[in-house]
Image (cartoon, helix red, strand yellow):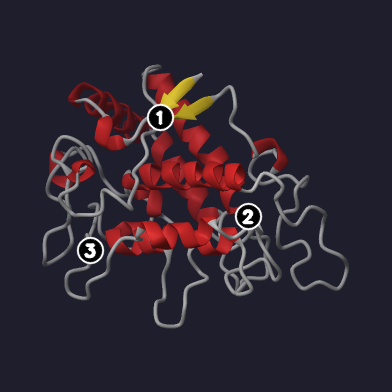
């Protein structure tokens, strides 16, 4: 079993090992394959297809499995590397440690949002964007969106999600306004005065490539989702009698039938169910 650490506690050597392993996955093509996977399974409500990665109950178990795939690839390069997590309720500034030149690099420049610092800067020659919908070949960010400022989620916003004892509710999508931890944490269940909450708000705060289906083009994606995974742990501990919903496939006549994943249905592209991903005991732990 290995440990996922808070990114702020990483040593300079650990940061270097992590970024070096990420760069190797980019060099050998495995990284861009991961980006394509996320983009393929980023299916919005308006599509009549199966939703497995986002806007659906399987948001947490799908991303847990996805993170594990990335982590196992990293460990194939360097067995001592794991995915660090970023607690955005405390490290909530464009000058927080993860944006340092020796780790993820900082925000993009004003005119075109191109990241100019750190190992993933295009000018370093090692990070060329090949998967996406824009012509830019460079990584983009716009931390905090200065032209229309946005803040990272607060501890209170996170607690608002954690306090909900129900995992998810009908209609099991981005409009599940009756409550449910999944939608509150994923961030669609925001009040009318604010479009984004929690997970979604973080993507918007970073900006650039993090705002679409090809968000993993930015390595910050993995640190963000490691924290989302940790928060799911916290919710499970807080509500031990609450489980994944829907527990059974939706009945005939339900408009979401065959569009969302029940507890024991396989999540593509893997032959694993949400039940298989409810625990990571014996695999990794959070420090």
Does 158 sit left or right of 150 as displayed?
A: right
Q: Where is residue 26 in the image (x, y as percent from the top left)?
A: 33, 35
Q: Which residue is drawn at 48% across and 41% down?
A: 230
Spatial separation of the CA atoms under disc 2 and disc 1: 29 Å
- Toward the bottom, the furthest residue is 192
The residue where tag 3 is placed is 144
Q: Which residue is drawn at 64% across and 60% down?
A: 51
Q: What element carries label 2?
A: loop
Q: How crowded is mark 2: few (under 14 residues within 10 Å), some or many (20 or more)?
A: many
* Image marks 2 and 1: residues in contact by CB distance under 8 Å: no
Does 147 sit left or right of 216 as displayed?
A: left
- Which of discs 3 and 2 lies nearer the camera? The answer is 3
20 or 58: nearer the eye?
58
Mark 3 / mark 2, whichever is N-terminal: 2
* Marking on residue 52: 2
Quarter of the image where the C terminus is located? top left
The residue where tag 1 is placed is 287
């Amino acid at each position: 079993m290995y440990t996922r650490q808070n990114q702020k506690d990483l040593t300079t050597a650990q940061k270097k090992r992590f970024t070096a392993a990420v760069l190797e996955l980019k060099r050998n093509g495995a990284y861009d394959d991961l980006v394509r996977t996320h983009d393929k399974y980023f299916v919005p409500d308006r599509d009549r297809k199966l939703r497995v990665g986002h806007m659906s109950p399987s948001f947490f178990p799908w991303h847990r499995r996805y993170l594990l795939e990335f982590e196992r690839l990293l460990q194939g390069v360097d067995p001592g590397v794991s995915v660090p997590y970023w607690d955005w309720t405390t490290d909530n500034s464009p000058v927080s440690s993860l944006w340092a030149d020796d780790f993820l690099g900082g925000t993009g420049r004003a005119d075109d949002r191109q990241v100019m610092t750190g190992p993933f800067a295009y000018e370093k020659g090692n990070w060329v964007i090949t998967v996406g919908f824009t012509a830019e070949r460079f990584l983009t960010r716009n931390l905090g969106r200065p032209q229309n400022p946005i803040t990272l989620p607060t501890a209170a916003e996170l607690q608002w999600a954690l306090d909900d004892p129900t995992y998810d509710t009908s209609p099991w999508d981005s409009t599940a306004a009756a409550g449910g931890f999944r939608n509150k944490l994923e961030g669609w269940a925001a009040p009318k005065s604010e479009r984004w909450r929690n997970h979604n708000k973080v993507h918007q705060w970073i900006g650039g490539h993090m705002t679409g289906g090809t968000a993993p083009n930015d390595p910050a994606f993995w640190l963000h989702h490691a924290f989302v995974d940790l928060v799911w742990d916290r919710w499970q501990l807080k509500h031990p009698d609450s489980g994944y919903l829907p527990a059974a496939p939706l009945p005939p006549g339900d408009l979401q039938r065959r569009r969302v994943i029940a507890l024991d249905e396989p999540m593509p592209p893997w032959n694993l169910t949400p039940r298989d991903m409810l625990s990571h005991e014996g695999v990794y732990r959070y420090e």
